[in-house]
Each structure stands twice: as structure tokens, then as C-alpha cells.
Image: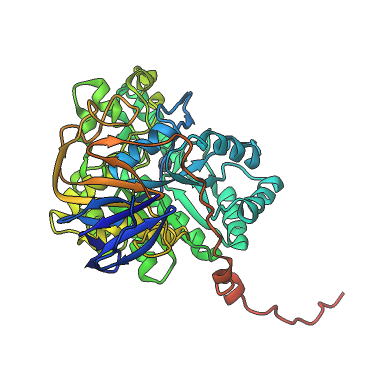
Amino acid sequence: MSLLIRGGTVVNADRAFRADVYCENGKIAAVGDNLEAPAGAEVIDAGGQYVMPGGIDPHTHMQLPFMGTVASEDFFTGTAAGLAGGTTMIIDFVIPNPQQPLMEAYRAWREWAEKSCADYSFHVAITWWDDSVHRDMGTLTREHGVNSFKHFMAYKGAIMADDEVLVNSFLRARELGAICTVHAENGELVFRLQQEIFERGITGPEGHPLSRPPEVEGEAANRAIRIAEVLGVPLYVVHTSCRQALEAITRARLEGQRVFGEVLAGHLVIDDSVYRHPDWSFAAAHVMSPPFRSKEHQDALWRGLQAGTLQTTATDHCCFCDPQKRMGIDDFRKIPNGTAGIEDRMSVLWHHGVNTGRLTPSEFVRVTSTNAAQIFNIYPRKGAVAAGSDADLVVWDPQGTRTISAKTHHQNIDFNIFEGMTVKGINSHTVSQGKVVWKDGQLDVEKGAGRYVDRPTFAPFYEALKIKAEVEAPEPVERAKAAE
Ligand code: URQ
Ligand code: ZN
Ligand code: ZN
């Protein structure tokens, strides 16, 4: 299968330039001027459009079993919706139950993901600790291409990792050359605030953000950063939603610590007024953690993205339909946490990022694709329009518009947090493994075509990293034996 994308402007993280792109056998074969296509090749006329690396969403939860139900989006429908919006790869999460062997959970998720129609990979969550977890982390890095381990500091009584688990896991990740990622909310504080608020008679979705104020996220982000600092391990903070967490990341980076920050498209454009909406289902549909914040936080997050303090954008695509959300009709603590976004992230970011002058097209590529590829060590296979890279591409029409709606989206959920938003800047085509899978508003995907993407560890570079104590610990003091 060969494809020529002619007449477009290629946009990579470093520069934008006029060039044709020729793809063959799933790879980009050439990027250059006046490329010829062999007879029978498919040709896309990209005049007036950009040709960019396909989006990478480093944070999704397809068909996640969570809070007594299972997310409604599965790996096939979710990756198809991603392709419809220009995202050509996801990094999802294997989340073992406490005491569940990591390899058992890993095999289950690998099986679920077989039906994906776009490429995928997995972070593995460390939700408990014993010698078997230590062992399985080694197996996962050495034999299964896992180079990132997730830690939920929230969700007490379920998948929360306390400091002991964090320290054990961070040390093991460092040994293995893997990066640690955290969901940074203080789970003890959330648990207690939930009780306080519920007992005060606030049972509706408006109680959710009250139980998870920004300070709760700021504390956990800083704690995780400090633990990583002392143990000498790189850290990636997922769904940074507030100024307090951003400040912790900013300080660490200013001091040269390897800390990366992720922000969700939703947290950049939606504020906490949604929780006070009179319609219960509308408010509950926005229940996710960390919650949507007040406007001051969105401004801070945009500045973090522009400054390069936040490196990636994601969606935390974790879908629960209204009947599922209504499990918490009498108690906001029981509303399954999660919202969708995989189909709209790219256009929402272009519309609110590039069209407003906050981001250049190259910066857009950086935060929707290249940075995630580099942080998770799959660049330049992913995240670049370059000869030899996977032919995962979007042809981007900066003049194209669409109005986002649950009535027309491809996501398997009955709600869209961006409902009614008209965005300018859309993918006219999506190319996955060299095949045109989206054009003229139609998907042409194949269940199971997605591949598991191995992500090598960073071990070679870790040798230079030393646990702080190793570097600064003084030599033992020689002392004369105390007299008997
Ligand atoms: O916490 C997460 O990232 C998962 C469980 C999705 N739900 C959410 O509210 N963010
Ligand atoms: Zn999370
Ligand atoms: Zn998540």
C-alpha cells in the first residue's frame, strides 16, 4: 500500500516547511519536493493544509473496570474515535487490583486491547507492594516494553499508593530505567473531605470539587516530586489541573529536576461552574478527578503549556454513560469518575491554542505528539514526519470547522464535555500505518489493526543518575571502640 500526500506544509516539532510525503508499507519513505508516486498509489492533495505527526494521547482508560462498573468505551471504539479526531496512538493503563499479580492484570489488558484499530501501549499502575511486584516490574520492562509505572495517590481504599508503595516502586523503577507517573491528589484528605461534605448534606455532584480542592493536588504533586528528587528518578505528573500543582512542577524544573507535566484538553477550557448546573446529569457527567477548576487555573495551565513547563496534552478518556453516573444519584462519592475527549483533543487544542496565538503549529505538534513520544521513548518512530517514522499522520485543514456534539461524535458515551463548541482547525484526513482511515468525514478502520508498541527503558542514561543519598552521604566516621 503506497500513499503520496502532495502539496502540503509539513509541521514537525522543530519547524514547518513545504514538502510532499510518500508512505510505503506503513512507514514514511520520503519527505521532499515534487515526489513522484508509483502507479496505483493513493494520492491526497494537501494544498493549503498541514501534514503533522498523528496525535499521541498518553492518558486513556478504555473499558476500565472502576467504581463498580466498566467504562463504556472499549479499545476498538475508543481508538476509532481517536482516529476520527487525528489521534493515531494511545498509551492506556494496566491497573491491577491490590494483591492482583501484575502479570495477570497485564495479560488481561493486552487481551482487551487486541481489538484496537490504532497503535497502543500501556503504563502499568503499582497499586500495592510485595516481592512479586518488584519481580514483575522487572519482567515488564525487560520482556514487555513497559518503561513507565503509574501511581494513584488518590482513591483510598481502592487503588491508592501510599508513601511506602511510592518509595518502593520509585526505587525499583530507577533500578530498571523506567519513568514514574503519578495521579497527584492526597487520597487521605479527599476521603476525609468527602465525609465532611456529605455529612453536611451536600450529596450532589457539586460536592465532588469541594472534596478535592487545588491544595489537595498541590500537596500530592509536591510530595511525589520531592520523593522523586530524593530517590533520583524522573517523574511525570498526569492531568495537572491547577496552579498549585503547576507551581510544584515549575519549581522542580527550575532546579533542574527531571519532572514532566501533562494537562488535559478539558482542564484547559472547562471550569468548575459545570458542577453547579441545575441538571443533575449534566453536572455528574463532568465528575472526574482532579475536577474542573475555576478560571484562574485555566489561565495558569495555558501559560504552563506555552512556557514548556507542561509538556504534553491528553484526555484521560474514561467514559461512563448517564445510567452509570446515576450510581451516585444519592451520593456524589459513588459517581464513577471520568469524562471523554479522545476525539476532540486535537481540534480543541488547535482552536484554543493555535488560533488564539498561544501556540505555534510546531508547538501544537510538540504538545500533542512529539513530547509524549520523546518522554516515553518511542521517538522518532512516533511523533515525527520523517523518513523511517511510522506513517501515522494527520492532514490538517486550518480553515475547516466542525461543531462538537454527542449527537455526531464517534465516542461510545452519551455526553460530550465540549458539546456545542465550534472549532476551526480539523483533520481532513487521518493516516494510520500508511492507510487513510479517515477522510470525507468517514472512518475506514479495521478492528485489530492496532499494534502493541514496545517502549524501551532509559537504562543507558540512568547510570548518570544517582540517588541523592549516594552522592551526598558522607563516609562513615571512624570511631575508637568505646571502653567496655
Ligand atoms: O483517575 C483517573 O485518571 C482515572 C480513574 C479516570 N478517572 C478520572 O476521574 N480521571
Ligand atoms: Zn487520574
Ligand atoms: Zn486517568
* Snapshot quadrant of residue 374: bottom left
- In the rendered image, residue 72, in percent from the top left (x then y), is placed at 40, 26
Q: Specify how the rendered protein is coloured.
A: rainbow
Report ligand 3 position as a quadrant.
top left
Left-right relation of 410 to 7:
right
The reply to whether residue 268 is visible in this rendering is no
39 relative position to 141: left or right: left
Q: Nearer the viewer, residue 316 or 370?
A: 370
Q: Residue at x 23, y 49 (%)?
A: 349
Left or right relative to 298: residue 388: right
**Residue at 37 percent of width and 58 percent of height:** 383
- x and y percentages locating residue 423 in the rendered image: 15, 43
Does the image show residue 428? yes
Check the image and report above or below for 197 versus 356: above
- Along the horizontal axis of the image, is 311 left or right of 16? right
* Position in image of residue 50 (x %, y %): 21, 57
* Up/down of 402 relative to 250, above or below: above
Q: Hey, which quadrant is residue 364 in on the image?
A: bottom left
Q: Point out residue 51 in the picture as x, y percentages from the top left corner.
A: 26, 57
Q: Quadrant of the C terminus?
A: bottom right
Extreme right residue here? Answer: 484
Q: Nearer the viewer, residue 469 or 145?
A: 145
Q: Quarter-wise, where is residue 410 in the image?
A: top left
